[in-house]
């Protein structure tokens, strides 16, 4: 073997090792969370109210689970819809100044510290009514999710070959029918992935909720104008508490949250079949 | 004589680039009208200017008239979707919707445009369109299968069926055989000769032999200008213009 080939093999070995190393944290985290948390998870854990700090009651994360579903639904309805149509606009009107500026701002927004988004939601939806509430949390998560979904939906629509766009419009349909009824299914993998990734992103967000939903409620659901809990916030609050019982609940909740997010990713990979173009 | 389409002083720009220059011609009904010319002469643009598919290009600007049945498709207040439904369009690359079945590819147009009342009427329309496109016998047992399983030539005939299902008056074909092998190409050409009984066909081709084989009238387009137009036999045997002569004898790409 000559020197060039040896160096090539060596370099390949180094970068392969680095690739493996970069994947270690995800497995380490999964192992850690499931080793500590899975033993606390069962059906009643998913349904019950959290336990008092001391005493025998095992308790669960029912309200936080309901809260997370409520908040993610709000974010998907508000942010998902706005993000989707923004993405469609960015893709199909990319020649306009408005589109170019919007895209630039969205790219900045992706990198925005989410705690600042939480503060913003606090000033406009919490402070005026003087109460933490679910809507403020959903609003904050919507702002977090919009740039993700918009930029990914843009990519999805951009990936549709021009000749298919021509085919759709040549059928004599209006733009909404062409984009939403015909071409959407061509881009469905990209669009659904964008929505699912956005969902996974907000399901795990904590910072935007700190100033918006309070999070220590022991009721399941009191209305969108009332405080609500969410799994990430419950983990944060319980893990910082001095009570061993709450630590266990936090680990269990972490296992549930991780499972939800992994499920979303698996669904986005498996169910959404690729459209061959 | 009533015309299928009349084009008057049509000018198209892409940004600052003048693509079509004062193009004027008329197409009689129920003939095959070929537009030939070298690559980049504006043939495809001309086709897309007729059914206003050019509107998809934000940088395109159009001046002049395109009339179907006396109605200018560029007049104010015109419904662009109506304009596009007067035409069926077949493209250079066979472009069936890859996620839809063979049946759905043909059924989609009539469905979204509300052309049929019920499923049985739709079934009949789809069958008829596939028969007209000489595809029915090959696909009648595979209607539910994805269009992507068809060969290139079959896909192109599926696209013709898709265009026919809209019950258009005029069929626009943008180099429909450019990406097909000779056997599939000749099938499409036979099909066109059959279809002109019912429709007016306007085909764009960069291949003068194809224009000579199938068209009744031919227009020669060169660098955005209409150089010559006439009955195909005349244009090919006694071209009036030197450029046309060069082109038809193959001395120009």
Image (spheres, rainbow, N blue to C red):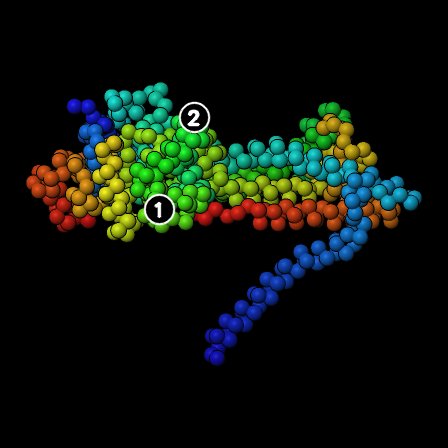
Residue B20 appears in the figure: no
Most extreme residue toward the bottom is: A1
Task: Kindly report the distance in space between the C-alpha atoms of the residues bearing marks 1 and 2.
Answer: 27 Å
| Left or right placement of residue A61 versus residue B25 in this view | right
Most extreme residue toward the top is: B77
Viewer-closest of B79 and B252: B79
Kindly identify the residue that appears in the image at 35 percent across and 42 percent down. B136
Most extreme residue toward the right is: A55
Residue B195 locus on image (x, y percent): 25, 36
Kindly identify the residue that appears in the image at 34 percent across and 29 percent down. B85
Disc 1: which residue: B138
Quadrant position of residue B199:
top left
Viewer-closest of B104 and B239: B104
Q: Is residue A37 above or below residue A181?
A: below
**Badge 1 local density, few (<14 within 10 Å), some, or many (20+)?**
few
Badge number at residue B166: none
- The tally of labels here is 2
Residue A206 appears in the figure: yes
Residue A221 locus on image (x, y percent): 76, 31
Kindly identify the residue that appears in the image at 81 percent across and 46 percent down. A249
Kindly identify the residue that appears in the image at 52 percent across and 34 percent down. A86
Viewer-closest of B77 and B30: B30
Disc 2: which residue: B117
| Left or right placement of residue A233 versus residue B29 in this view | right
Q: Is residue A146 above or below residue B67?
A: below
The chain letter under disc 2 is: B
| Left or right placement of residue B176 versus residue A26 in this view | left
Q: If you read the primary sequence from the N terminus, does the residue marked by circle 1 or circle 2 appear first?
A: 2
């Amino acid at each position: 073997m000559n020197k060039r080939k040896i160096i090539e093999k060596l370099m390949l070995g180094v970068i392969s090792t680095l690739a493996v190393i970069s994947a270690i944290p995800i497995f380490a985290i999964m192992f850690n969370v499931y080793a500590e948390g899975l033993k606390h998870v069962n059906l009643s854990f998913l349904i019950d109210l959290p336990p008092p700090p001391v005493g025998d009651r095992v308790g669960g994360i029912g309200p936080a689970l309901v809260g997370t579903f409520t908040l993610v639904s709000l974010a998907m309805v508000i942010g998902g819809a706005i993000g989707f149509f923004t993405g469609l606009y960015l893709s199909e009107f990319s020649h306009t100044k408005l589109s170019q500026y919007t895209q630039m701002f969205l790219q900045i927004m992706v990198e925005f510290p989410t705690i600042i988004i939480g503060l913003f939601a606090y000033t406009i939806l919490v402070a005026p009514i003087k109460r933490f509430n679910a809507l403020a949390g959903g609003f904050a998560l919507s702002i977090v999710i919009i740039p993700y979904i918009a930029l990914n939906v843009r990519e999805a629509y951009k990936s549709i070959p021009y000749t298919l766009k021509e085919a759709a419009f040549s059928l004599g349909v209006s733009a909404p029918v062409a984009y939403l009824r015909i071409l959407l299914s061509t881009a469905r993998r990209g669009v659904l992935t964008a929505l699912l990734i956005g969902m996974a992103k907000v399901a795990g967000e904590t910072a935007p909720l700190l100033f918006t939903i309070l999070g220590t409620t022991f009721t399941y659901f009191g209305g969108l104008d009332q405080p609500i809990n969410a799994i990430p916030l419950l983990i944060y609050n319980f893990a910082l508490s001095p009570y061993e019982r709450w630590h266990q609940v936090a680990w269990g909740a972490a296992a549930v949250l991780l499972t939800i997010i992994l499920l979303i990713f698996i669904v986005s990979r498996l169910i959404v079949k690729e459209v061959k173009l | 004589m009533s015309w299928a389409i009349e084009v008057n002083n049509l000018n198209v720009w892409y940004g600052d680039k003048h693509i079509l220059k004062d193009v004027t011609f008329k197409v009689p009904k129920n003939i095959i009208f070929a537009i030939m010319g070298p690559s980049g002469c504006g043939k495809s643009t001309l086709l897309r200017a007729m059914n206003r598919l050019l509107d998809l290009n934000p940088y395109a600007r159009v001046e002049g008239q395109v009339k179907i049945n006396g109605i200018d498709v560029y007049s104010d207040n015109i419904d662009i979707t109506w304009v596009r439904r007067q035409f069926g369009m077949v493209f250079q690359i066979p472009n069936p919707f890859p996620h839809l079945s063979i049946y759905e590819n043909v059924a989609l147009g009539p469905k979204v445009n509300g052309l049929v009342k019920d499923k049985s009427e739709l079934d009949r329309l789809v069958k008829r369109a596939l028969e007209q496109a000489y595809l029915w016998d090959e696909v009648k047992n595979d209607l539910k299968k994805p269009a992507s399983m068809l060969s290139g030539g079959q896909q192109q005939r599926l696209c013709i069926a898709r265009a026919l299902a809209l019950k258009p008056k005029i069929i626009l074909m943008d180099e429909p055989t450019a990406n097909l092998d000779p056997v599939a190409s000749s099938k499409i050409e036979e099909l066109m000769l059959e279809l002109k009984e019912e429709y007016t066909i306007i085909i764009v081709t960069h291949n003068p032999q194809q224009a000579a084989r199938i068209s009744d009238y031919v227009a020669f387009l060169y660098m955005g200008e209409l150089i010559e137009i006439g009955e195909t036999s005349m244009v090919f045997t006694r071209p009036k213009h030197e450029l046309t002569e060069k082109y038809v004898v193959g001395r120009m790409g």
